[in-house]
Amino acid sequence: MSKTKKSFSFALAMLTALTVVLSACGGGSNDAKGSDSKSGGSDKPVNLIWYTIGTPQKDVDKVMAEVSKYTKEKINATVTMKMIDWGDYQQKMQVNVASGEPMDIMFTSAGGFDYVQNARKGAFMELDDLLDKYGKGIKDTINPAFLEGSKVDGHNYGIPANKELPQQEVWRFNKNLVDKYKLDTANVKSLESIEPLLKTIKEKEPNVTPFAMDKNYVPYVPYDYVIQNLPMAVKLDTTDYKIVNILETPEMKQALTTMHKYYQAGYIAPEAATTGSTNDLMTSGKWFMDRAQTQPLADNAWSASYGYPVFSTPAGDPIVTNTSVQGSIMAISANSEHPEKAMEFLNLLNTDPVLRNMVDSGIEGVHYKKTDDKHMENLPESKNYDMPSYSLGNNMLLNLNPGDPDDKWEQFKKFNESGKNSPILSFNFDSTKVATEMAAIQNVKEQFWASLMTGTVDPESYLPKAIAAFKQAGLDKVIAEAQTQLDAWKAENNK
């Protein structure tokens, strides 16, 4: 559907935490060796099980039946897609991998079922040889920066989506409400600058959520996280490459104070800290604004997805980070019974427009219709198959939305070239030496993080408690270990 409800780079938004030790993946090598014994010499098609992120859709099985007809003909494989909702993905995938649940392909990212940490723990298969044998189309098609930036300790463990390379934060607005009250959004950029708009909507539209967010929301501050949404970060304009506890920075304290002010004023939903998704709000149109990560022509994509006009204004500059490079990745399970066939499927998904658009938009004539050779528009049944485009492969194969210019994907390439690199781009922290502390820190994060970030609690009293709990869990030791690794990386890369 060429939709960008959740950006990958995302994202928004999103679903972050370091996973527990994956017991089911221990032992043995996780690289791909030998042949696909389950399918290599047989005419019987194999069925690939694909776990991905997003609100489960009513028509997913119907669409996958059509996908399977196509892939059976092309690569002698069928596909079963299993969707896990945004707020549940991290935890449920931890359980699935640890228990040995059958799966072949799974969504992972810097911010959702942590790509780097799970690669190191053996959850994913090393793909170097498979890419060379069955992924030539991938290597020829997607931006090389994605494959290079997603290497872990020199190896590829997943196929990144070919999409926007930098991440840029924006404020998104329901244009119907902006127009209704003739609101001025021209000077909106900082968190503080949105207050007059929120106040107007609160007073005039009591049934509308002024500031929409879920439990994955984190206020924007000019830092890059060592591990997304854990309190270790480096300032974007750093000269000393010092890792700090983000909760102890004046920028974050100010942001959290503002968020609590907005929460008390009723601009934020009372249940924000426990809400897994704002999908219902977006479907109903009963929201005024939120924050998202953008890409070229994202306003068109959001508007097409929701069925009413949405527009955005910048909340930050385009920055290339590990989170954006690793914002949407498909990995092959280390326990996959069909790794070669899984790579054949990923190669097809990233090179074949017919397959890519079917996975994204559903069945032509049912969920969408083509309006010319490049453009499409959603049909009413699209509400039953409303997928997050960023998580499903090579976006630059997608049909264009109504209003998209013919040069949309050229604009993406220019946007990708405009991004400024984060100072710690390509630095991947290895937490092996502090695994016990990391598990304890994760527990503290689950207790404090969402309620602080959404403004639900008063940072004046709650922030010191969170800082103390993180320290007691061993955060200072983890930061010291990360700093040692970053210093070595900095020296090795002549930073």
Image (cartoon, rainbow, N blue to C red):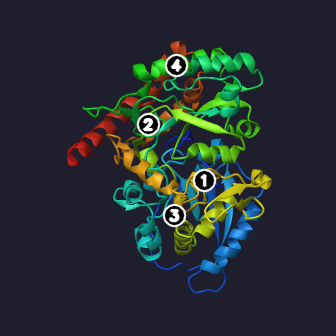
User: Which residue in the structure is indicated by mark 2?
Assistant: 437
Q: Earlier in the sequence, mark 3 or mark 4?
A: 4
Cα separation, mark 2 vs mark 1, equals 36 Å
Decide: is 17 above or below 189: below
Cα separation, mark 1 vs mark 4, equals 31 Å
Badge 4, how many Cα within 10 Å: few under 14, some, many 20+?
Answer: few
Tell me the kind of residue under disc 4. Answer: Glu
User: Which residue in the structure is indicated by mark 1?
Assistant: 389
Q: Nearer the viewer, mark 3 or mark 4?
A: 4
| Residue 261 seen by the camera | yes
The secondary structure type at the circle numbered 4 is: helix
The secondary structure type at the circle numbered 1 is: helix
User: Which residue in the structure is indicated by mark 3?
Assistant: 334
Q: Earlier in the sequence, mark 1 or mark 4?
A: 4
Decide: is 436 above or below 468: below
Q: Residue at x 74, y 31 (%)?
A: 286
Tell me the kind of residue under disc 3. Answer: Ala
Cα separation, mark 1 vs mark 3, equals 25 Å
User: Which residue in the structure is indicated by mark 4?
Assistant: 192
Give left or right: position of 142 versus 365: left
Q: Nearer the viewer, residue 286 or 478?
A: 286
The secondary structure type at the circle numbered 2 is: helix
Decide: is 429 above or below 367: above
Q: Residue at x 51, y 28 (%)?
A: 219
Q: Earlier in the sequence, mark 2 or mark 1?
A: 1
**Badge count:** 4
